[in-house]
Amino acid sequence: MIQLTLNIVISFSVYFLLSISFLFVYFSSKIFNIANGAIIAFGAYFYLLFIDAFCFPVLISVLLSICLSVLIGILCELLVFRQMRKRNPTLLAYLIASIGLYVVLQNTISLYFGDDIKVINTAEITVGHQIFGAYITTVQIITICVSLTFFIGVNLLLHLTATGKSIRAVSSNPELCNIYGISSNKVILIAFALGSALAAVAGILSAMDTNMTPTFGFNLLMYGIVAMIIGGVGSTRGLLAGSLLVATAQHLAAFYLDTKWMDAVTYIILILFLIWKPLGFSGKRLKKVEV
Amino acid sequence: MEYILHLFILICFYTMLSQCLNLSAGFAGLISLTHAGFYGIGAYTTAILSTYYSFSFWPSIPLAMIISGCIAFIVSLIALRTVDDYFIICTLGIQVILFSIMNNWMDLTRGPLGIPGIPSIQFLGFSVESKISFLLLSLFFVVAIWFVLRNISRSGFGKTLMAISDDEIYSQSIGKNVYLAKTVSFTLSAMLAAIPGTLYAHYISYIDPTSFTVNESIFVLSIVIIGGLGNLSGSFFASAFLVLLPEALRFVGMPDSIAANMRQIIYGFILVIVMMTGKNGVQELFEPAVKKS
């Protein structure tokens, strides 16, 4: 039972990182950025490249792969989404373009690294630490700590710094921001950079914990998106609740039914939420028509 | 020769699938990622009926359509409560649920083992086994579906759907039942999507869940977008292009392992470019003055 709780906490930390990385972009620019899934995978594969092929130390590899992922995220924004924004297209157009981007990026990884499962070997495999009769590995402890740090960090960033305030301002009204001299393009660029960095961190951590394929980012991203929709767009506390719910439901399903139903259970929760509580725990309205 | 015929049959399948999706995505603006799921429902229905209960091909088509239609109706009741991005995510979720049912319900679908030994189609006493006869049969269905969809798009109902995708609130204000029209178009497109599924099962004679994944849905959606939303002949050309693309790449001298990924990269790029320029399909990229039909 303690093991189950511990597993829930570990998945919860990963999903929280994912949903917050997705939220940064969605919150500021309203772009439903599926390409983030490829950036998650990019983070993990860059890390593999640096640590395996170039034999860099762990910390430098992590930093370098985060930087490169941020670069890719920024390039996506500059080359695709910013050009699109000039014509002011529908939200669906952004979504479809990001699906296209995801397909391109993911297959670039497949081309270079191959489609097979890769494992990152940082240290020799050990049993892990024992806490109250449950086992936890070092990577998992790091995951939980990193997630906690980012929760506090992101909250401070959004509410105390000027950057965070301008992100929130752009989210509520980009045109008014431009009038007041906050460049919405610049803010969205910052949001893309932050989101990609977080995505890369989440990718590296979960790839260290289990293993990776070029498509593993998409599944992870979808869990993050489900957590975000359940939690409601616009509050980090909602994200906490959302990712906690998703993680709990998945592990209970794995415990009582079978691990193979985990995906289905996640989406069933999403659909139940969309039926009864489409706004999530908190957040904005969904309806196009307000009567 | 056999292989060329095989490619033509694949083009037929994707033409049918993308044209069905065009009914909901192109005309009504309901861009859904569930179509591989409905395709799979068609395939599994006919596979189970013909191997376990020795049904013949013809009665299993309407049955597959009805089952797929019922599921699509339930899905549309759920999914149509949402709009835009959330609609796509909702349909994506349903696609994953359908896939995991196919993959995990061992008693019914045999899971990842798949269902082997699906008999070939019997038609007027002789069996459709050779590639050329199967191609003729699929062409018949392509023409039938094309005809149905073309008539729908020109009917009053089709015009209503186009009005909804242009301006939902306005069409509601002039007394159109938006919700009903969306439900009907989504259900209808899912019912029609079951037809290529049944054909596929009988053609390959073995099905497993990996043919009906999210990637397949994305592929079908890309065909529709590349061909142009609401453009039926565009869907046909786009599916021909995307099915023949790996062959063209092989012709250039690219090894097989790279060609599969290159194909996806190319269609991803086209998708991004089409969306960036804001044109409706590749056709309009080259002739900017074309009138939207």
Image: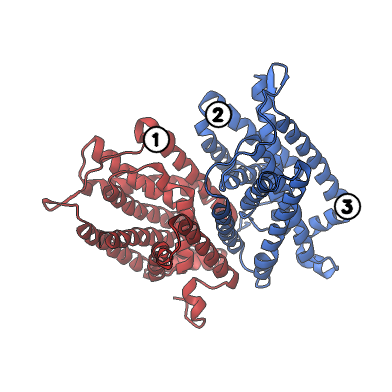
Write down the residue under mark 2: A253
Task: State how far apart marks 3 and 2 are (Cα).
Answer: 41 Å
Tell me if mark 2 has few (under 14), some (14-19) or many (20+) residues whose alpha carbon lies within 10 angstroms of its own: some
Report the chain holding disc 1: B
Tell me if mark 1 has few (under 14), some (14-19) or many (20+) residues whose alpha carbon lies within 10 angstroms of its own: some
**Residue B21, located in which quarter of the rendered image?**
bottom left
Same chain? Circles 1 and 3? no
Report the chain holding disc 3: A
Task: State how far apart marks 1 and 2 are (Cα).
Answer: 19 Å
Chain A rendered in what hue? blue
Task: State how far apart marks 1 and 3 are (Cα).
Answer: 52 Å
Letter of the chain shown red in the rendering: B
Q: Which mark is residue B120?
A: none
Front in this rendered view, residue B275 or A91: B275
Q: Position of residue A158 (x, y in %)?
A: 82, 50
Q: Which mark is residue B111?
A: 1
